[in-house]
Image (cartoon, helix red, strand yellow):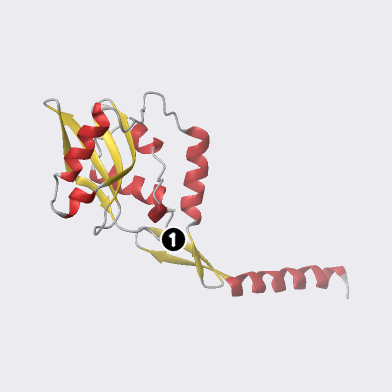
């Protein structure tokens, strides 16, 4: 077979094979790549990679369980919607200025990310800044970051960009 015929034919066969295994699906707020029936959040992977090279977490702290800030946030979450919220277990807390973001697991509730703001020397939950549920097939961090940025635009973007889910529910 001549090169003039073989190369275009090879290209057509290659495109056909790829098209039979890979497709894109619009879902919720974005697109998923589907490879042989398995949904993959390619845009989320790209966002995570970009963020890992560009994030600046200077000023963002992670209070330890023994610190007063940690305890105040934990108590605020436990008191938010009793009795289910009383089983709150903190997987991670990130703070910047008067703002905090807590990753929480519960016995009977879905895992959550809770936005809090310090007002009048008290930790207050920002009701519109609560993400609760599972994220599959989406990658957790990009999906939750997008949601929180939309719901609470006044939260510092540096804080949003610096959390990384730790709970098994999100990984």
Q: Which residue is mark 1?
A: 31
Crowd tier of the residue under label 1, counting other residues whose Cα lies within 10 Å: few below 14, some 14–19, many 20 or above = some
Question: How far from the left and from the top, in percent, is residue 117?
Answer: 20, 33
**How many numbered discs, if any?**
1
Question: How far from the left and from the top, in percent, is residue 163?
Answer: 39, 39
Q: Quadrant of the N terminus?
A: bottom right
| Left or right side of 46 for 97 | left
Of 126 and 3, nearer the camera is 126
Q: Residue at x 88, y 72 (%)?
A: 2
Of 115 and 142, nearer the camera is 115
Residue lying at the far front of the rendered structure:
66
Q: Residue at x 30, y 29 (%)?
A: 66
Q: Secondary structure at mark 1?
A: strand
Question: How far from the left and from the top, in percent, is residue 23?
Answer: 53, 69
Residue lying at the far right of the rendered structure:
1
| Left or right side of 160 for 151 | left
Question: How far from the left and from the top, in percent, is residue 58?
Answer: 41, 24
| Residue 171 sits above or below residue 58 on the image | below
Quarter assignment of residue 14:
bottom right
| Left or right side of 15 for 32 | left
Residue lying at the far left of the rendered structure:
120
């Amino acid at each position: 077979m001549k090169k003039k015929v073989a190369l275009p034919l090879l290209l057509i066969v290659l495109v056909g094979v790829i098209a039979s295994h890979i497709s894109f699906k619009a879902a919720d707020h974005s697109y998923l790549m589907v490879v042989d029936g398995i949904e993959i959040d390619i845009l989320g992977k790209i966002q995570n990679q970009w963020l890992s090279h560009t994030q600046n977490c200077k000023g963002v702290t992670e209070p330890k369980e023994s610190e007063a800030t940690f305890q105040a946030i934990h108590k605020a979450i436990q008191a938010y919607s009793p009795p289910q919220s009383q089983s709150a277990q903190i997987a991670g807390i990130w703070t910047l200025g008067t703002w905090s973001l807590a990753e929480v697991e519960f016995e009977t509730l879905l895992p959550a990310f809770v936005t809090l703001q310090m007002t009048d020397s008290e930790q207050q939950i920002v009701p519109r800044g609560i993400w609760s549920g599972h994220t599959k097939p989406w990658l957790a961090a990009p999906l939750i970051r997008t949601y929180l940025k939309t719901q609470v635009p006044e939260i510092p973007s540096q804080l949003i960009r610096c959390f990384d889910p730790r709970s098994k529910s999100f990984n």
